[in-house]
Image (spheres, rainbow, N blue to C red):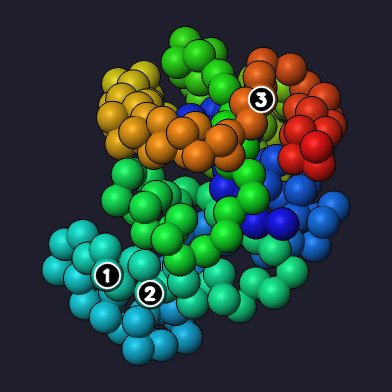
Amino acid sequence: MNIILIGIQGSGKGTQAKLLTKKYGWKHITTGEIFRENINQKTNLGLQAKSYIEKGELVPDSIVYEIVSDAIQKANNGFILDGFPRNLEQTEFLLENFKIDKVVLLELSDEKAIERVMARVNCDSCGKDYNLLFSKPKNDGICDNCGGKIVRRKDDNEIAIKKRIEKFHLETEKAIDYFTEKKLVVKIDVSKGINEILSEIIAKIEQ
Ligand SMILES: [Zn+2]
């Protein structure tokens, strides 16, 4: 099965993608990851992408499409796309070239998303992740692992988060409308626990 996972920051998209790939043996395709792979392996596409990134420019869509297509063609046993497509053009490209079975939309209000992202912290020394809502350290402000100091990432401040959420709505809403027209979308309320969300996704994609 070929799945697209769409969700705002804080929706637990990465977590669900990992659980689903583990269950079904699909390939988890995230744009960040496949760019890094191509750049590290110095593929032709990777080198082209790198030249734009080094100049501080956006990688042109034509190269993004080739990198995504390459990853999809290597996923023989199905895939979950995460972080692509972000806009209408990318959506059209995808549907013209590949079979997509379901688009799973993880729904969370902006307020809840902000609350969750603001609760994300990690250890200053060993990097262990915590979430003050779901997985707090045993002692406030101190890492369970190494006794290090618990801090928040610099780009997880409220203004930056709101900007990212705004960008998500601006870019992705039209893609969601298009997928909805094609009757591919299943909506999942992600205000529940991780396992409940996973069961609901499985039930809906297997329907
Ligand atoms: Zn630590």
Q: Give me the residue at 22% from left, 65% from top.
A: 60
Tell me, for residue 66, which label it has, or none: 2
Q: Is residue 155 left or right of residue 190?
A: left
Three-letter amino acid code at disc 1? Ser
Distance from the alpha carbon under mark 3 to that under mark 1: 32 Å
> Along the polypeptide, which appears first: circle 3 or circle 2?
2
How busy is the neighbourhood of tag 3: few (under 14 within 10 Å), some, or many (20 plus)?
some
Q: Give me the residue at 57% from left, 60% from top.
A: 99
Question: For the residue labelled by badge 2, is the local secondary structure a helix, a strand or a loop?
Answer: helix
Q: Give me the residue at 35% from left, 89% from top.
A: 44
Residue 57 is situated, as x and y percent measured from the top left of the image, at 16, 62
Visible residue check, residue 196: yes
Distance from the alpha carbon under mark 3 to that under mark 2: 30 Å
Residue 45 is situated, as x and y percent measured from the top left of the image, at 35, 82
Q: Give me the residue at 65% from left, 56% from top.
A: 2
Tell me, for residue 188, which label it has, or none: 3
Give the residue number, with chain letter if any, for mark 1. 62
